[in-house]
Amino acid sequence: WDEPTQSVLGNRLQLKASTFESLLAHRQIRDPLTYTAADYGDVWRSLLAYATDPSVKGPAAAVAGLSAQHTGIGRSVTTSYAPGDLKYVANALADLETAGDFEATFEPVLDGAGSLATLARIAERLGQPYRQAGGVQLTFPGNLADYGWPRMGSQGANSVVATAPANTFAPGTWTSGYGSGRGVDTARLAAGYPLLEISVQYSGAAITDQEQIDAYADGYLGLVAGSPTIPQVTIDASSPAAPRVKQLGLGDEAALLTTSTRHPARADGSPGLQAIVRIIGWTVVPPDDGQDGKITLTLGGVPA
C-alpha cells in the first residue's frame, strides 16, 4: 500500500502492506441494494461479490483467486443500502458481523494449480478449540520473548444504551431496552461495582424490531464489560518450540502460561497466569539487516 521511506541514505526502501480485506476499505456501495429476510451470510457474500464484480464496477474491480465459502448463519436480516450514503464495503461487512453475531476472515490458500488464492470464510465462531487446534502453548519465559497486558478500565462500562436511526423498513428511531436488563452487567453491579454508563450509535444493517437493537446492546456490553484487556505476545522466533504462523488459525484457541512481575508464580511454582485464549490477530515483520523477524499475536478471551 505505502512507501513510508523518509530518507534515501543507506539505500533502503520501506514498504507497508496489509491483508486482502484492506482493499474493501476502498470500495463503496454506489448502487441501491436491498435484502429482504435474507440469511446474514448471504448478504455478507453478496456485498463482497458486489465490491469485486467486474460487470458492476468495471474490470479493475476484479480480484484474482478470490472465492467465498457458502456457509449460512441461520439468522435473517432485512436491510437496504442507499447509494447516497457511499458506505464503504469493509464497514458494511463489519456491521453485519456485529449485528448477526458471527465472525469472518480472508484466508490465504493454494488453489488446485498451486497458485496463491484467497478464501472468504464466515462462521458463528472461527477457529478450533484448544485440543483440536493442536494444543499450542504460549509460554513466558519460554517461546515468548515478551508480552503486554494492557487493561483499559477507563474504557469499560456496565450499562450500555444503543440507538439506531430510522430506515426504509421502520420509520421510528430505535433505542435498546433501558431498564429491562438488556445491555446491563447485572452481575457486576450486584457485586458492588460502581455504575459506568455508555451509549453507542448503531450504523449497520437496518434495524426492524426491538430485539435486534437489544441484542446489539448486549453484544456491545461484551466488548466493554469490566476492564477490556487485549494483550499482545511476541513470539521468540529463535525458540525451537515457537509456533509458526502457518500453524495458527484465526480464532484458534491456545494455552497462555506466563510468569512475571505482573503475574507472579503461584504457591506451587506453576505459572502465575494460566488461561485458554483466542488468537484474534497477528502482525508479522520480516527479518531485516541484523535483526530477526518478529511475530506478534493479539489475543482475545482473556480473564479480566
Image (cartoon, rainbow, N blue to C red):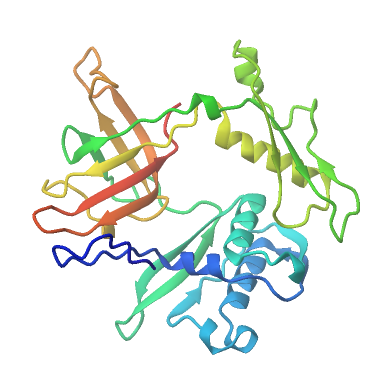
Q: x, y (%) of residue 45?
A: 60, 70
Quick check: can you spot residue 63? Answer: yes
Q: Which of 180 and 297 is in front in this view?
A: 297
The residue shown at (49%, 77%) is: 67
Q: In this view, does 112 lie above or below 295?
A: below
Q: Residue furthest right?
A: 171
Task: Residue 279 in the image: state x and y as whole percent.
Answer: 38, 47
Is residue 70 shown above or below 246?
below
- Residue at the far left in the pictured view: 290
Please tell me in which quadrant of the rendered image residue 298 appears.
top left
Residue 144 spot, x, y in % from top left: 20, 39
Q: In this view, does 169 lie to the left or right of 291?
A: right
* Horizontal arrangement in the rendering, residue 92 relative to residue 20 (left or right): right
Quarter of the image for the C terminus: give it. top left
- Residue plotted at (63% across, 39% down): 220
Q: Nearer the viewer, residue 34 or 74?
A: 34
Res. 130 visible in picture: no
Number of callouts: 0
106 displayed left or right of 42: left
| Residue in the picture at 43% in, 68% down | 20
Residue 155: x percent and y percent?
54, 29
Q: In this view, does 60 lie to the left or right of 162?
A: left
